[in-house]
Amino acid sequence: MAKYVDSQRDIEALFASSTWTSLNISAYPVNYQIPSTDTEFVKVEYLPLKTDQSYSRSGISGFVIVQIYVPADQGSKRLMEIADSLDTLLENKTLTNGTKTAASRLNIMGPDSDNPSLFRGDYEVDFKFFN
């Protein structure tokens, strides 16, 4: 029973798939130092928040936040385009190890506080995983 590892693998594997890599948008773990030359990228944060017990099964639920960064001078359209691509990848899916995702939501965060030349939005999707 590797519920944390299996569900995290499900999520992270999506960003190595041809569906994502064909977009030419770099994806990094949330705690990774981003190269200063990157002007469009995402950071992926996997957050298992709750243990679930149901009908003799155990599992976890939580959500994934994909922080989207685009150049600040492009407005929000590019942010929305990337969010639509993330929907194709993540929204309402059953993944390889059995992780199930739900509907997405997008929060426009505005200019990045660490680098004002970047504009940020947070794409979020809930997930559940049962053994």
Image (spheres, rainbow, N blue to C red):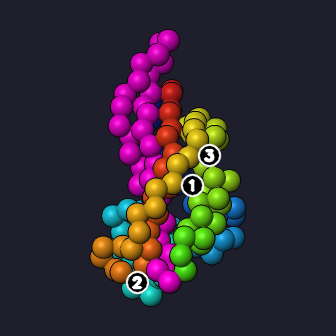
Foreground pick, 124 / 26? 124
Which is in the foreground here, disc 3 or disc 2? 2
Residue drawn 36% across the image and 69% down it: 32
Dominant secondary structure, magenta? strand
Residue drawn 46% across the image and 56% down it: 107
Q: Which residue is mark 1?
A: 13
**Label 1 neighbourhood size at 10 Å, few (<14), some (14-19), many (20+)?**
few
Three-letter code for the amino acid on which mark 2 is drawn: Ser
Residue 96, quarter of the rendered image: top right
* Residue 95 appears in the picture as rendered: no
- The label shown at residue 91 is 3
- The label shown at residue 81 is none
Question: Is residue 64 placed above or below 62 in the rendered structure?
Answer: below
Q: Position of residue 128 (x, y in %)?
A: 50, 33
Three-letter code for the amino acid on which mark 3 is drawn: Glu
N-terminal-most mark, 1 or 3: 1
N-terminal-most mark, 2 or 1: 1
Pointers 3 and 2 in contact (C-beta within 8 Å): no
**Label 3 neighbourhood size at 10 Å, few (<14), some (14-19), many (20+)?**
many
Q: Position of residue 61 (x, y in %)?
A: 44, 33
Q: Which residue is mark 2?
A: 117
